[in-house]
Amino acid sequence: MKIYKFVLPLLLVLSSNHLRVYAQSESISFGHAVALENIINKEAGGEHSLRWLNVNTDPGTWRVDGELLKCTGKPIGVMRSEKIYENFILHVEWRHMEAGGNSGVFIWSDAKPDAKTRLPAGVEVQMLELDWVNQHLQDGRKPPIAYVHGELFGAGGTTTIPDNPRGERSKSIENRCKGKGEWNTYDVICVDGTVKLSVNGRFVNGVRNASSKKGYLCLESEGAEIHFRNFKIIELPPNADVPKPNL
C-alpha cells in the first residue's frame, strides 16, 4: 500500500511533465519563405511554408484563422521558427486589436526565454499600439512618441549600435504606424548584423553591429491580442566564415 502511495504521485508528475513538453512542441504552419536564387531564376516550387514551434505559451495562444495568425497575447512568451535564419528580407503585416497592445518580432534569437521576462535574446523589432505611450507614463510624462513607431533594440543581452539613438535603442525618424484595428506593414532587411526597418512604405529605422547575426525568428505574445498576415521571408546568401551559433 505504501508503494502505491509513492508511485501514483510520481506517475502524475511524469504525466504532467510529458504533457507540458508536448504542448511546447506543438507546431503551426504560417507564412512562406523562398530563396533569392529561386526568385531570380524563376524556379517553380521554390517557395515553402514556414513552421513555428510553441516555446512557452499556451496551446491556445496562437491559432491560424484563414490567412491570419491570431495571438491572444496571453501568457507572455514566444513561438519560434522551426529553422534558423541568417541573412533575409522579412515582410509582415500586423494589427493590434486592443489599445496599448504590445508585441514584436525577434530577429537572430536564441529562442531561450528568460525566467523573469519570459522573452528570449535577439534583436527585437517592436510592434506597439499607439495608445501605449498614454498607458505607460514615466514620472508622469509620456514616453517619446517614436517609441511606438517601430523601435529596434537588442534584447536579453544582445547588443547593437542604433542608427537613431534613444539610449541603447534606435527610434524611428518618422511616425508612420497606425492604431488599433488598422493594418501596418513592416519590411525588415537583416544582413550581417545590420537591420533596416521600413514602416508602411518608408525606411525609418536601423541598427548595426548586432552581437547575434544568426538565429531563430520569434513572434511575441505580450498581453494583448494581435493579428498577423502575409508573413514572407526571402532568404539571402549567407555570410562568409560565420561560426555556427550555440543554440
Image (tube, grey):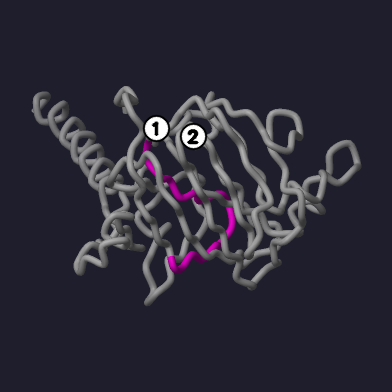
Q: Which image quarter is the C terminus in? A: top left
Q: CA distance from mark 2 to mark 1?
A: 7 Å
Which numbered circle lies on residue 122?
Answer: 2
Magenta span: predominant SS is: strand
Q: Position of residue 121 (x, y in %)?
A: 48, 31
For mark 1, what is the residue? Answer: 110
Q: Earlier in the sequence, mark 2 or mark 1?
A: 1
Q: Which residue is nearer to you in this view: 140 or 51? A: 51
Q: Position of residue 153 (x, y in %)?
A: 61, 36
**What amino acid type is highlighted by mark number 1?**
Asp
Which residue range is magenta in the image? Answer: 215-230
Position above or below: 25 against 47: above
Q: Which residue is nearer to you in this view: 58 or 48? A: 48
Q: Position of residue 128 (x, y in %)?
A: 66, 54
Position above or below: 156 against 60: above
The verdict on residue 229 being magenta is yes
**What amino acid type is highlighted by mark number 2?**
Gly
Disc 2 on helix, strand or loop? Answer: strand
Q: Position of residue 194 (x, y in %)?
A: 53, 37
Q: Residue furthest bottom?
A: 66
Q: Residue furthest front?
A: 41
The answer to whether the residues at label 2 and label 1 have Cβ atoms under 8 Å apart is yes
Disc 1 on helix, strand or loop? Answer: loop
